[in-house]
Amino acid sequence: MPEKLILAYSGGLDTSVAVRWLKEEQGYDVVALTVDVGMQKDRETLHSRALAAGAVAFRWAEAQDTFVRHFVFPALAAGAVYEGQYPLATALGRPLIAKHLVEVARQEGASAVAHGSTGKGNDQVRFDVSVQALAPDLRIVAPVREWGMNREDEIAYAQRHNIPVPVTRESPYSTDENLWGRSIECGVLEDPWAEPPEEVFEWTKSVAQAPDQPAYVEIAFERGAPVALDGRELDGVTLVKRLNELAGEHGVGRIDHLENRLVGIKSREIYEAPAAVTLLRAHQALEQMTLSKEQVRLKERIAQEYADLIYNGLWFTVHHQDLAAYVQSTQRHVTGSVRVRLHKGTATVVGRKSPKSLYDFSLATYDKGDVYDQSAAPGFIHVWGLPVRIQARAQMLEEEE
């Protein structure tokens, strides 16, 4: 009896071809598993496509709520953005998909799991390391890095075996999407000098097509997590979807990034992340109001470490647990509302308020109501400048002679 294998199935070219290859070349009974983290794909279409490709069964896991609450919002609270640009949408989805792979493998009595990642990308690391952390006994198969086919070979293979896939030589883009963002690569995008054609974008309007009049949105946060839009309380999934629509309509969230992959090569990536870009800016503005200078500065360093950890596939680690504990502590007082203007590709914070604000108008104002004791300034400056004066007398003045 053939061994059973659980394949993380997106319904794209790689995983559809992988179903047939795993069956015919490796002898597995393949169960195709789609984990819904916010893909704009029809369940029935993926079901029929997987079976047509040769899967013995199709499984669907609804994971949007878990994805937002336990992966997206913690990353938002951390301020995790890779290399200052990438909000880590795909990177956040992979450990959750890996977790479901392991769970279904246990349920089905499978001896192996598989994914459609290439041997030169980051996702192979994220899948492999996550599975190894959760179920080190499971065998991991990665067809795309084993079969020796390039992308054109895969398209020809799919056509030869009548495997229905949404990719042709004329439209060769590889895409991935979830609630936190959409990534596009391959084709003309591999030339870093070429401007991305408008056809690659689905969630965002171009600046030229965006409305001439700005839109304003008020985002409420509680302990670092967004909980309402324009005074209306929403669950996390609905809130992110609504912001994707609102910000995308105004062209917010397009990212063209030449990034450093974990495997050591640079790649040109195009992202659409309207909600992510908007929420990250709003959250940062609220932190500036509710955290001390020392907290903000340390957290900026933690944010980079947190982003690297996610990007590098180390979600299921003790190191992550330690960082997450610190981030959660910093969010105790990050409660309040932020007003954001969406206009012609930009999300600009134009207002913020919080019951936990460290901003004191009576200290900041130069008008009536100023309670700051300016007479205390000379004494403060005298003490503050003491080491400067000592060093100047002992060293700098001597060097001038």
Image: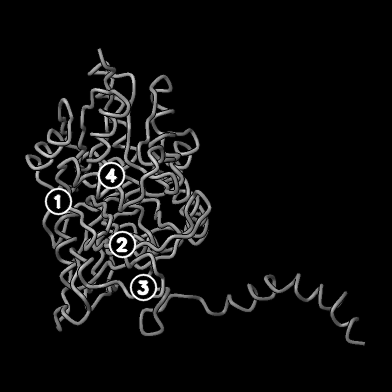
Q: Secondary structure at mark 1?
A: loop
**Which residue: 38% across, 69% down?**
360
Q: Earlier in the sequence, mark 3 or mark 2?
A: 2
Q: Which residue is mark 3?
A: 361
The foreground one among 14 and 206 is 14
Q: Earlier in the sequence, mark 1 or mark 4?
A: 4
Picture disc at residue 271: 2
| Residues marked 1 and 2 touching at CB (< 8 Å) | no
Marks 4, 2: nearer the viewer: 4
* Image: 284 above or below 323: below
Residue type at the position of mark 2: Tyr
Graded by Cα atoms within 10 Å as few (under 14), some (14 to 19) or many (20 or more), the crowding at tag 2 reads: many
Marks 3, 4: nearer the viewer: 4
Q: Secondary structure at mark 3?
A: helix
Q: CA distance from mark 1 to mark 4?
A: 18 Å
The foreground one among 37 and 149 is 149
Q: Secondary structure at mark 2?
A: strand
Residue type at the position of mark 1: Gln
Residue type at the position of mark 3: Phe
Q: Which residue is mark 4?
A: 14
Marks 3, 1: nearer the viewer: 1
Where is the C terminus found, in terms of image quarters?
A: bottom right
Marks 1, 4: nearer the viewer: 4
